[in-house]
Each structure stands twice: as C-alpha cells, then as structure tokens.
Amino acid sequence: MSAPKKFKLFEVTGIELEYMVVDRETLQVSPTVDELFKDVTGAITGDVERGDVEWSNELVSHVVELKTAKPTRKIPSFQKKFASEVKAINAQLAKRGRMLLPTAAHPFMDPFTETVIWPHDYNEVYALYNRIFDCRGHGWSNLQSTHLNLPFANDEEFGKLHAAIRMVLPIIPALSASSPLLDGKTTGFLDGRMEAYLHHQEKLPELMGSLIPEAVFSQEDYYRAIFSPIAQALAPFDTEHVMDHHFANSRGAIARFDRGAIEIRVIDIQECPSMDLAIAELIVAVCRAMVKGRWVSNYLQRAWSETDLLPIFLQVIKDAGKSVISNKEFLIMFGVLKEDRMTAGKLWEHLFNELRSELSENAQRGISHILQHGCLASRILARTGKEPSRERIIEVYTELATCLQDDRPFE
C-alpha cells in the first residue's frame, strides 16, 4: 500500500463534522448509527462512501461523522456538500423517527446510563479505552467536535505549523464554544465539552499532557517528548498492542506523521455546516498568517511553553469571547501592539479585520454573526435562561436541529 501523498503547508484542509442521532420528539440520544448505515448500504459498516463526503462512526453508537473523503483545496466548496449530506441523513433517519442534532454536547444525556460503545469494526481499540477509563462520561461519550487537518510536507514545515497552531489553540473556543449545558443544567462553562474533556483521561495524564501540545518542532523531538511517554503509559494495559500512538494522543492538536498533518481538536461543532466552515476558514487564515510571520517571527512563537498558554485556554473555555486576555506578550503575537489587555472576542475581531480579504463571503457572514451575537453557547443561554426546564431545552435544541437541516445560523 503506497504512503499517502504529502501536501505542502495550507495546500489542502481535511474537515470532520460530528453530530448526534436523537429521537425527533424527545431528543433522547439514539445509539443507532449502525442501523442508519445498514439502511443505506445494506450492511453494518463503520464507513459509508458518498463521493466527496464520507460518513463514519466515532467511539459511541449515537454519533455520526461527516468528513471530506479527500483533503480539499477549497473549504467553501464543501458548504453545499456537507449540507446536502445532512439532509440525506435526516431523510433516512426520519423514517425511524430520528434526526441529527448539532452542538458539541447533548444538553441532558446521562452518559452513565445511555452510553453505547460502538460494537463493530475498530471495537478492540474502543474496548481498550473503556477498560482503562470507563467511557461513560461527558468527556468520552457526549462530545461532538469539528476536526481540522492541516498538512505539512517535511520537518521544517511541521515545526512552523506546530508553532503557529499552538499559539492559536487557546483562543479558538472564544469563537466556537457551543456546549453550555450538561445534565440539563448550565455548567458555568460556555465550552462545557472542553472542560469535561480536560478531565476524562486523568488516570493516564501522559495521553493528554497539558492539552496545549509541548513546544516540540521536529518529528524526532515529538516522538521523544510525546509519543514515547504515551507508549510507556499504555503498555501495561495494551497487552495485545491494538493501540496506535497517533490515536492515543489526546492533546488539543495532534501530529499525524502517518499522514503528514496536524489535527486541531478543540473546535466545538456549530449549528450548521456553513458556520463550521466559516470558523474553519478563519482558523486556517490565522495559522497561515502566523506561519508567514505576519505579526511576529516563527522563532518568537516557539518560545511559548504549554504552561504559558494553558491559563488563557482555561479562561476562554469558561467565558468565550468575554474572557479578558491580560497577557500583553500574547496579544503582541497577533499584532496587537497598543493594548495591554483585550477580550478574546475583540482579539478575534482584530484578526477578522486583518484577514477578511482572504475569506469567502460565507465565512465573512458567519464570523460577523458570531462577533455580533456571541458564540453559539452564549446564544443558546440567551434563549434557555440560566435555569432552564427540560421543555425549554427541548424547544431551543429542536430549533437548533432545524438550523442544521436548513444550514442557517441560530439567531
């Protein structure tokens, strides 16, 4: 089997979008993705090939993932393709009284009683995770995200890209947070998914590290500092050697040397594909500007340790765009020279204004909507209130499901 083609920096992007399957009336999670796939293909499978977009399963049986079959050179070209696949899945699910639900966490799922681990292909890896960690928890079985895969062709490109992505990671949830409710209650975090995720692997801390990846900028150093400790931590549990070190790495951005890409994992899924792709475009544009040294050199970006960056991330997952960044040196990294402190929302506004000309019209509309009305989590809370009833939650999230079906922003 030939090795995958290595793309150069920013030549293409791989995109994955995860959604929940739920009952259309009650919104209870429905662990029936295998049924959906069988209805479409005639067989139980982990992947459904549909041309430019593939469907697949992730860990639990109520989550379906849509992904670019091949990395794309033009993110905007996938807006209609993803939206069309959402409609196709919903049409199939409707026959059994189900539908897709967006946002990064189900608002009232009980993961301890409702989790069903995917029992089919790749199950041996999921079973190992379950044996080590018990995957019945919000950080395991109730989280849906957008994954962005950005390519690198060699070690030099990897170092530049990794440096840039590490700088951008702490502020991403200010744009993307969409998980304010868990267990039917507000959590105090606009990005409840990431707060739960931070604690889901504490039994083996080597797998996640500090979430913000370590300051390593070559494949050799990455294996030494990240993959080697992961392998050592897993060894007593993975006696049958089923776990791939790429798969076990749970940092907020992970290096996939097997396919020449870095995968960004801290983006909450939005209400519809056009909003997901708008955020993707802006993140890619900021990373590209960082790699090119638009505001500061790559050398200065490499000086930041994960312990410098993590406090910013922890504040941003709580308050999203309203988080105040008071680290002047961090702001300088993005060309903010005159301010000592700035909200994360204002920082994104600055970046959007700097890079607007590089974005498609869809991305400009989507980002403008977020900057004007707040991240999706804050818009959800504005509609549910801080102590919502189950009925109110169902009402608001049913409207979010309609936004997904119609591919339109949630007001």
Image: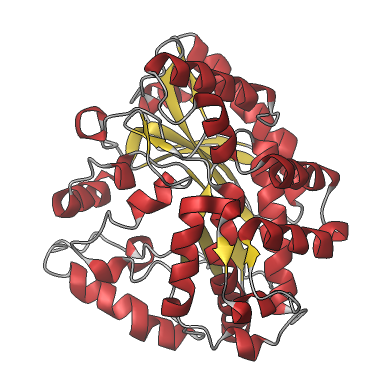
Write down the quadrant of residue 214 in the picture.
bottom left
Q: Which residue is drawn at 55% across and 52% down?
A: 320
Q: Which residue is drawn at 76% across and 77% down?
A: 338
Q: In this view, does 132 lie to the left or right of 76?
A: left
Of 164 and 311, nearer the camera is 311
Q: In the figure, 246 relative to 113: above or below? A: below
Of 201 and 374, nearer the camera is 374
Q: Is residue 18 left or right of residue 390?
A: right
Q: Can residue 258 be seen in this view?
A: no
* Figure quadrant of the C terminus: top right
Percent coordinates x, y for residue 147 in the rendering = 53, 52
Q: How many labels does the image show?
A: 0
Write down the quadrant of residue 34 in the picture.
top left
Q: In the figure, 252 relative to 38: above or below? A: below
Q: In the figure, 129 relative to 246: above or below? A: above
Residue at the extreme right: 357
The image's colour scheme reads secondary structure
Q: Which residue is drawn at 54% across and 42% down?
A: 269
Q: In this view, does 255 lie to the left or right of 354?
A: left
Q: Residue at x 26, y 33 (%)?
A: 115
Of 316 and 284, nearer the camera is 316
Percent coordinates x, y for residue 241 in the rendering = 20, 64
Q: In this view, does 221 lie to the left or right of 8?
A: left
Write down the quadrant of residue 323 in the picture.
bottom right
Percent coordinates x, y for residue 229 in the rendering = 26, 78
Q: Can residue 388 be seen in this view?
A: yes
Percent coordinates x, y for residue 340 in the rendering = 66, 76
